[in-house]
Structure formats: structure tokens, C-alpha cells
Image: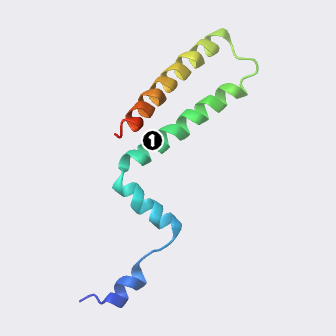
């Protein structure tokens, strides 16, 4: 039988553990965060090109257009209370 003291002793009250508990309630946060990190890394890779080729510029413009479209759709969802 587990006592209340044992439960309290085992509970992790750190900020990281709390974030983990909150993220577990909303797994889409983890997905969004992972996707955002990947997108920023890709954008930074483009910025590090010196100079980028025309094909790289075209690919980046297409990628940024897709990214902005996704952001705009998500902002609309948030403004509607989704």
C-alpha cells in the first residue's frame, strides 16, 4: 500500500516536470514545438548560404509561403477559440 508521504516524496515539482505534464495534456504542443524548431533550423540554414543560388531562393520563398499559410490558418483557429 502506498502512503500519502510516499506519493508526495515521489512527486516531481520541478518546472520541467510541470511543462511535461502540461504538454501531455496537449500533445499538439509538442508536435508544434518540434515542427517550429525544424522550420527555424531550415530558415537559418538558408540564411547561412552565401550567396544562395536562384533555385535555393525559389525553394525558400515556397517554403516561407507554406509556413506563413500554416501560421495564418492557426491564428484564425485561435481567434475563433479552437
Q: Residue at x 41, y 36 (%)?
A: 79
Q: Position of residue 3 (x, y in %)?
A: 30, 90
Secondary structure, mark 1, is helix
Residue indicated by mark 1 = 32
Q: Residue 75, position in %: x, y?
A: 45, 33
The quadrant holding residue 22 is bottom left
Task: Count neighbours of disc 1 (C-alpha within 10 A) and say few if under 14, some if 14 to 19, many if 20 or more.
Answer: few
Please tell me which residue lies in front, 23 or 43: 23
In the image, residue 4 above or below residue 35: below
Which residue occupies the foreground of this view, 51 or 24? 24
Residue at (40, 62) in percent of width and height: 21
- Relative to 46, is 34 above or below? below
Residue 9, above or below 66:
below
| Residue 61 image point, x, y percent | 58, 16
Q: Does residue 49 appear to the left or right of 37 in the view shown? A: right
Residue at position x 62%, y 29% in the image = 43
Amino acid at each position: 500500500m502506498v502512503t500519502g508521504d510516499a506519493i508526495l516524496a515521489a512527486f516531481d515539482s520541478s518546472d520541467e516536470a510541470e511543462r511535461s505534464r502540461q504538454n501531455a495534456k496537449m500533445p499538439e504542443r509538442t508536435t508544434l514545438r518540434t515542427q517550429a524548431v525544424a522550420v527555424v533550423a531550415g530558415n537559418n540554414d538558408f540564411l547561412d548560404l552565401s550567396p544562395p543560388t536562384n533555385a535555393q531562393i525559389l525553394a525558400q520563398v515556397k517554403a516561407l509561403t507554406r509556413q506563413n499559410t500554416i501560421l495564418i490558418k492557426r491564428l484564425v483557429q485561435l481567434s475563433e477559440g479552437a
